[in-house]
Image (spheres, rainbow, N blue to C red):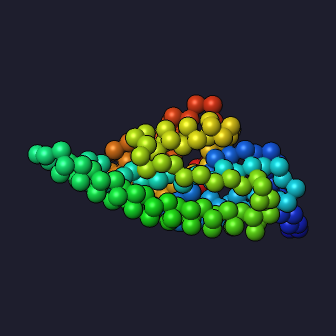
Amino acid sequence: MHSRTQKPARTRSIKHLKALVVIDPTEASKRVLCYLGQLATAGDQSEFHLAYIASRVPAELLETGGAETPDREEQLQSNLRRQQRAWMAGTDKAAWRILRAAQSQLHTAGVQKQRIHTCVSSPLDAREAADEVLLLARDQDCDTVIVGHTPQSWLSTLGGGDLAEQLVRRAKGYAVWVIG
C-alpha cells in the first residue's frame, strides 16, 4: 500500500504582466476578477488596464428624419443632441460604477492602486468591439488581453462568435486569456 503525501498547494503569481482586462456587468467578468485576484500578490509589478466597451448609441439616436424647414431641422438636431448626451451620461455612469468596483476588487486582492488603470470606450465609435479592445491594448502598450467568456450554443455563434472568440482570431501579437 502506497502512502500518499499531499503536495503543497502550488502558488501562482503574475510578476510583470501588462494586461488590458475587458470588464462588463456579467458573471464572466466577475470570474476574471476573481482569477486575477488569486494570482495577484503585493510584490507583483503587474499592471492592469480595465476597459469597459460601451454599447453603441441606439440607431434612433443617430439621426433625425429631417424636416422641411431649416428652423424645424435645427430644433430636431438640438433635441437629438440633448437625447444623445443624456443617453451617453447614463451609459458612462453605469460603466464607471462597474470599473470602480472592479478596481476596488483588484486592490483588495493586493494589486497596488497605481497599477490599476481604467477607461471607457466611446459609444460613438463605429468599430467592432474586438477591434476597439485591440486598439486600446495597443494604445496602453499591453501585451496580454484578458476577457471573460460564457459558453454559447452553436447557433448563437453563427453571427461571428462572441468577443472572446473574435479576439482569439484577430489578436496578432497579443496573448489572449479567455476565462470561462
Say if 107 sits above or below 170 in the image. Answer: below
Which residue is rendered at x = 69% and y = 67% of the image? 105
Q: Give how far across and how far down residue 84 sits, in percent.
A: 36, 56
Q: Give how far across and how far down residue 153 sits, in percent.
A: 38, 55
Q: Give how far across and how far down residue 174 sits, in percent.
A: 63, 36
Question: From this viewpoint, is residue 67 visible?
Answer: yes
Which residue is rendered at x = 37% and y = 48% of the image? 157
Query: In front: 40, or 9?
Result: 40
Say if 108 sits above or below 68 in the image. Answer: below
Which residue appears farthest toward the front when viewing the image?
71
Query: In front: 80, or 7?
Result: 80
Q: Is residue 11 left or right of residue 66?
A: right
Query: In front: 127, or 38?
Result: 127
Say if 18 sits above or below 27 in the image. Answer: above
Quadrant containing the N terminus in the rendered view = bottom right
Quadrant containing the C terminus in the rendered view = bottom right
Which residue is rendered at x = 43% and y = 39% of the image? 127
Query: In front: 52, or 35?
Result: 52
Q: Is residue 41 left or right of residue 55?
A: right
